[in-house]
Image (cartoon, rainbow, N blue to C red):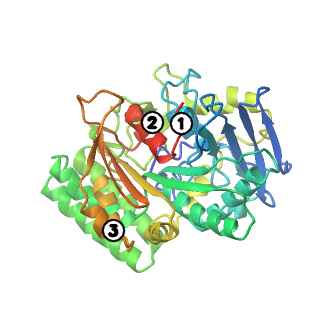
Amino acid sequence: MNIVSMKYLCVLVLCACASGFVSSVTSIRNSSGGTADGSETWGYIEVRPRAHMFWWLYKSPNKPKHPTKPWPTILWLQGGPGGSGVGFGNFGELGPLDVDLKPRNSTWLQKADLLFVDCPVGTGYSYVEDDSLFVKTDVEAAIDVTTLLKAIYNGNVTTVTSPLYIFAESYGGKFAVTLALAALQAIEKGELKLQLGGVALGDSWISPEDYVLSWGPLLKDVSRIDDVGLNKSNSLALKIQQQIADGQYVNATDSWNDLEEVISDSSNNVDFYNFMLDVDNDPGFLSKKSSRRFGKKPYAMVSKDGNDLDSLMNGPIRQKLKIIPINVQWGGQSYGVFTTMEGDFMRPRIAEVDELLSKGVNVTIYNGQIDLICATKGTEAWINKLKWDGLSAYLNLARTPLYCSKDKSTTKGFFKSYENFAFYWILGAGHLVPVDQPCVSLEMVGSVANTPSM
């Protein structure tokens, strides 16, 4: 594959890949660091021989001295595969500081402790000493993160006892559901001392088939493509549907790339993270390095002040952490992560959601209204395929409007739940819900994570 085409660069804020690979790294096995006051802890866990996963835990300053119920911990899983949660999720979306290292008013630390993990190995600061150690499937990635959770929750590297809520974005949703099942299995065997509070899937790539089938009709409805573009899109989407049905997942990934080309050409380069915009005029923090179409070139996270995430992570943050091996560059292996997982990229994970529901795990879905890549239309389509016993009752319920704090003048979203399943429709948000609608997102997080009152 021509590396310039970068056809596997993905579904999210994902693979803003920095150059540089690991060679002849001296294994550091398990190591950790942290701030003097204990508010932050970070480290490496060797999840397999010569495969090293990086984690970063923030303790919330908002935790009540005498909470009425357990204070939660949120594990954030980024997409890609190959996007860095320690970078993108932390500094770009919901951590205590932004890319300019300024305090974030909407940080999720107000509602929970935050655990960021660079998953799979090879993502962000995580690395492998040999390319053969990249994971090939979501399940393999889940097993690695379960190994990391054992080290953290069983008290080997730090002490965490709070209930864990797994929040994910984009491809991270596939990691989340497979991780939740792997963690449950370890809990049942007595290998992991953890209480799983629930799983929250934000704009998650759970059913690629349903998302690609939604693109053409959605864009036609909002006048972004015409009938010619719709017919081309539908034709390729049906081809992808058949390839997935036949288990031809690598071919389906190739066709997915072709469909993105068609969508971009037919729409004059619509932004896949916000279908109301062109790819080059998104006013958010994602600045594109070129006018190339989605999937052709990695996105760069650049702040309004002009600071970029790549320089931050390979500069000041690296210096702060002190334990990053000298020849490990943040994001240097993320292209390898994606290409190695191409055989799993288009594989659906609806059955895993069903299994979690059947086991009584709380599952929350939240979706941005103007996202295209993981459009709400596609999310609703795969939800209708669930075999969960409560589906019919859930579908027949009315939605509850959501507002921001005490302001009831503007509807910010809708909510509906039944038993252990919930859905949040977030209005005015694209793919990056915490960025586009921080206020209603924060309130949603508090509700999902069952955060005790102050």
Identify whether 173 is placed above or below 288.
Answer: below
Using residue 15 as the reference point, say whether residue 327 is left or right of it: right
- Residue beneath disc 3: 391
264 or 393: nearer the viewer? 393
Q: Which quadrant holds residue 65?
A: top right
Q: Residue furthest bottom?
A: 246
Mark before the other along the chain sequence, 1 or 3: 1
Q: Secondary structure at mark 2?
A: helix
Q: Which quadrant holds residue 237?
A: bottom left
Residue 66 percent coordinates (x, y): 64, 34
154 or 174: nearer the viewer? 154
User: Is residue 10 at all visible to an observer of this figure?
Assistant: no
Q: Which quadrant holds residue 414?
A: top left
Mark before the other along the chain sequence, 3 or 2: 3
In three-dimensional space, the C-alpha distance between marks 1 and 2, rounded to whole angstroms, equals 8 Å
Q: Residue shown at 34%/76% (left/top)?
A: 242
Identify whether 439 is placed above or below 261.
Answer: above
The amino acid type of the residue labelled 3 equals Leu
Residue 125 percent coordinates (x, y): 69, 43
The amino acid type of the residue labelled 1 equals Lys
Identify whether 31 is placed above or below 211.
Answer: above
Mark 1 packing: few (<14 Cα in 10 Å), some, or many (20+)? many
Contact flag, marks 1 and 2 (Cβ < 8 Å): yes
- Residue beneath disc 2: 442
The amino acid type of the residue labelled 2 equals Leu
In three-dimensional space, the C-alpha distance between marks 1 and 3, rounded to whole angstroms, equals 29 Å
Mark 2 packing: few (<14 Cα in 10 Å), some, or many (20+)? many
Residue 69 percent coordinates (x, y): 59, 43
Mark before the other along the chain sequence, 1 or 2: 1
